[in-house]
Amino acid sequence: MPPLWQYTKLIRSKNAGPFELTFDVMFKDESGLRRVLAAGALSPEQIGQLYRVDAAQVRFFVLADLLTVKISIPRKAFSGDLADTDIYGCQFHGPLVTLEIEEPAPR
Amino acid sequence: MGRELNRSIKAVAASGNLSTGFREESLVAAMRTGPSVLGCDAGSTDSGPYYLGSGKPRGPRQGVKRNLQIMLREALRAGVPMVIGTAGHAGGRPHLRWTTEIIREIALERGWHFRLAAIDSELEKGALAAAFVRGEVRPLSPAPALSEETILGAERLVAMMGVEPIQRALRAGAQVIVCGRCSDVAIYAALPLLEGVPASVAFHAGKILECGAAAVAQRLYPDSMMAELQQDGFRVEPPNPELRCTPQSVSAHTLYENADPYVVVVERKIAEIFALPGLEYTLNFRVYGGDGSMGELEPVSWVEGHEAGLVIDVVASSQGLASDILPLVWHTALHHPIPEYEGMVSNLAFPFSPPGIDVGPVYRFCANHVWELSDPCAPFQMQMEEV
């Protein structure tokens, strides 16, 4: 199946204040949103693995009316801190863009 | 509240940030629709802690002056209040002073007169430390660990104001209101709330307006935005016919820079503080073409090719020490041996001479906390003057 970006109109990361990162994944249509969720490609656990945070710290929202999945995680380094690599937090979405969506297992 | 609003209230955002800009014709067109308030956010924590720590505005002064001049002209012509949030990018006392000086300068040059309110949001360290000791200060999540020492040693502390201090200035008849650190949403929600717009509508519309034209589908350049608020919702529209909103672009902006889509934060909280790191020095190697932008989270650790960008960051306890370390670092890196080679090598293509640049002090956000207050206006001193 195609990578995540092919299902979407927008994938982005950004600071939500200096201490958190937030990701917005906005889908083209409801079937794409459903397929990606059914494939298990986006979940707190997956995000936890991808961004190396405890799944319990992942805030995960499915906003079906907006065809959107929103995810927020704490920053490893706060914005502008010594170890920070991206002050605006706007270049952390790359791994989501190319995320492989597996075929759902046949029933 | 409780009363039904039987008319609509219009609000105009000149731009998403006073230090960027807008097309004059866009703002003029928006102001012709009969708005009740004109606003512009001037700040952000997005650019990091430098501006708050150093007390320097982001500028550019000429651009900000141009923007303020057009906004003032239009607000005075329409006879509506103008609200500037988070003056000078960080909303500290020097940022507030910088902005009000520009406004007075314009007024003097143009012969304009109005009542100006400047709302100071810088906190007195001793008072905050005392509140901290009394247990009135609690962390938001996530937040750095805060201590009395951190508070007293911080370069600058600001409280983020909600709608109340702006409403106090509006009630006092201010036509131009310049705020220190301020919720972006409050800039646009303060007046509609006084007019009876429901809080859900006022805050959500404020959230859409706060970035100006950012809520359009393709934002080619920064520009103005307008909203019409009613009892049961609001309508947003860019005044510039080249730009357009779509349901997706507006809902995308509801989500923008907001950790929880169901919560818009306009709480009164104390915010960004700063302290110097207590280290002798640190070296940080950033490899672009490798993991420069995502660090340890980068899943593709190497991109094929024959060059990579390297930034070596030296941070020391003083500028003098950092400047002394810098040539040792670049010279060592320049001639660092390659294991497969024998003989002296030079590895780096310096685009500049000297290859290192002093970039000044480093600041750190060191608080993300709420100070529980009985009076939401208490920390915000308002200064009113007739210009």
Image (cartoon, rainbow, N blue to C red):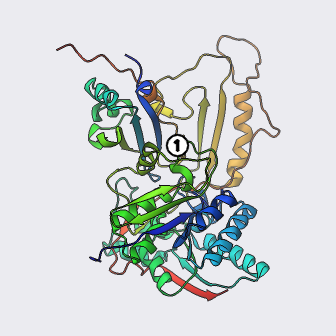
Q: Is residue B196 above or below residue B16?
A: below
Q: Is residue B52 left or right of residue A14?
A: right
Disc 1 marks which residue?
Answer: B217
Residue B132 shows up from this direction: yes
Q: Position of residue B123 (x, y in %)?
A: 49, 75
Q: Position of residue B146 (x, y in %)?
A: 40, 62
Identified at 58% across, 56% down, the residue is B239
Identified at 28% across, 32% down, the residue is A45
Closer to us: B8 or B210:
B8
Q: Is residue A52 above or below residue B34?
A: above
Residue A60 shows up from this direction: no
Q: Amino acid at mark 1?
A: Ala
Q: Position of residue B286 (x, y in %)?
A: 60, 34
**Residue at the far right in the pictured view:** B353
Q: Quadrant of the N terminus of chain B?
A: bottom left
Closer to us: B249 or B150:
B249
Q: Position of residue B296 (x, y in %)?
A: 47, 32
Closer to us: B2 or A20:
B2
Q: Is residue B45 left or right of residue A72?
A: right
Closer to us: B5 or B282:
B5
The answer to which image quadrant residue B201 occupies is: bottom left
